[in-house]
Image (cartoon, rainbow, N blue to C red):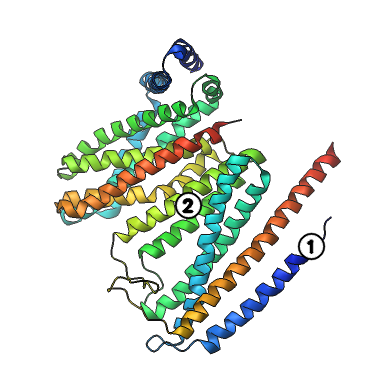
Amino acid sequence: MESKPRFLSILDLVSLTLLLVASGLVFFYAPMEAVMGQVQRVFYFHVAAGWVGMLGFLVAAVAGIFYLRTNDHKWDVVGLSSVEIGMVFAFINIVTGSIWARPIWNTWWTWDPRLTTATVMELIYAAYLMLRSGIEDPDRRARFGAVYAILGFVSVPMTFFSARLFRTIHPVVIGTGDPSAQGTFNMTPKMLQTFLFGLLTFSFIYADLLWHRVRLGKLNDKIEQKKLEAIS
Amino acid sequence: MNSDAQLVTSDAHQTASDSPLRSFLRATAAIIWKDLSAELRSRELLSAMLVFALLVILIFNFALDLDVEARNSVTAGVLWVTFSFAGTLGLNRSMAVEKDRGCLDGLLLAPVDRSAIYFGKAIGNLIFMLLIEIIVLPVYSALYNINLFIPGLLAVTVLGSIGYVAVGTLLATMAVQTRTRDILLPILLFPVVLPVLLGAVKGSTFFLEGREMSDIWPWINLLITFDVIFTAIAFMVFDYIVEE
């Protein structure tokens, strides 16, 4: 068995260090938001986790396109790995959002476009995993998974726009938002730095996890092959 | 069923010398005709969908207490839940009969473009769904004394059905080839098709409430966009989900 690549170990360390520094920034460097207080600090990791979730699903859709074009099994492993990571981070995004919404919107949940879209996204990729688990033939599983990952990713923005035709109360911090949004604030330079650092950190964590998960998938394939050889 | 598949094959042979577009259209028409004539003989699919749709409306009647005030705001939702449930029933069945006795393999062996098979099945499914709607809408109108014959509402219903069937046919083809085929289709279909349901329900509700056209157009545009995008995607990827 090949040993763990050295560069991967370095990436592990870098991601861990970045996460520690980012947590430090969030709690000690970023100033306290005047109206919302401490709970606003959830914003930094909330958006970063949402970003990684979207990135994961985007990578899965792109990997799906590459798989259908090349028929190369490694893209299937990348797609599945990316969906699994994306689901976890999208879930972190929803949970941290709820924690923030309880004091600010006075409710854990509301059927706002972004919240609706986030839920539908989780359900689409849960369906993706169920679809895969229902197929034994690896080739067909990879093909169907690729098709569904593409279809699902195209559907997500449509859901967002259709839900957006209703009024939204979710704050838009980057760019100009709906004036009726509740909980909007303007970022100070220190907040912006913390926010961007959080995005960077989570991107590194995503890359690190993806690498680990793809490596695991490949080792898993090897075991399957060995098993087949042992039987025959 | 097997003879129907052969009929498609021989039909396509005859047209091999024609222009590609004409032979494509003939293959599509042959598949639609096969589905319609099979249904005309057995009447399994339509009767099951229809009875199921009426049962769903009956359940809603008790669950929601559809009194006069509630009707205007809830009608579109009730109708679309009914159509989408009855629709999954029909989609599942229409692909399952192809899979059961190897008819799908027969269709794939036919020397026609694979996407002709997709469009044939999709248009066949669309016809079944529209037939159900043609029966359910007047029945609902009579039962609840509400006028559903607004041209705009009917247009929204057709647009919604097109989007629903475009994705539904693709996903049903995938679902029947899995181990968990009976339960998988709604799980795959509903989250992806949500924008079309949202657009159809909102568009219909606005027509029932007699809103301004400027309020309604965004929803109609959304439905048209959805129909176009998803038909295009299904057209592009259908080859990959039927290849062996």
Instruction: Answer left or right for A160 relative to B95.
Output: left
Instruction: Answer left or right for A43 relative to A85.
Output: left
- Tell me the chain of label 1: A
Q: Nearer the viewer, residue A66 or B40?
A: A66
Mark 2 — residue? A153
- Tell me the chain of label 2: A
Q: Is residue B67 visible?
A: no
SS for callout 1: loop
* x and y percentages locating residue A93 in the rendered image: 50, 69
* x and y percentages locating residue B201 in the rendered image: 28, 50
Q: Nearer the viewer, residue A149 or B68?
A: A149
For the point 63% across and 81% down, which residue is it? A20
For the point 42% across and 39% down, which residue is it? B232
Q: Is residue A214 above or below residue B7?
A: below
Q: Quadrant of the N terminus of chain A?
A: bottom right
Tell me the amino acid under the disc marked 1: Lys
Task: Specify the label residue A4 is tagged with.
Answer: 1
* x and y percentages locating residue B161 in the rendered image: 32, 39
- Figure quadrant of residue B20: top left
Tell me the amino acid under the disc marked 2: Phe
Kindly report the distance in space between the C-alpha atoms of the residues bearing marks 2 and 1. 32 Å
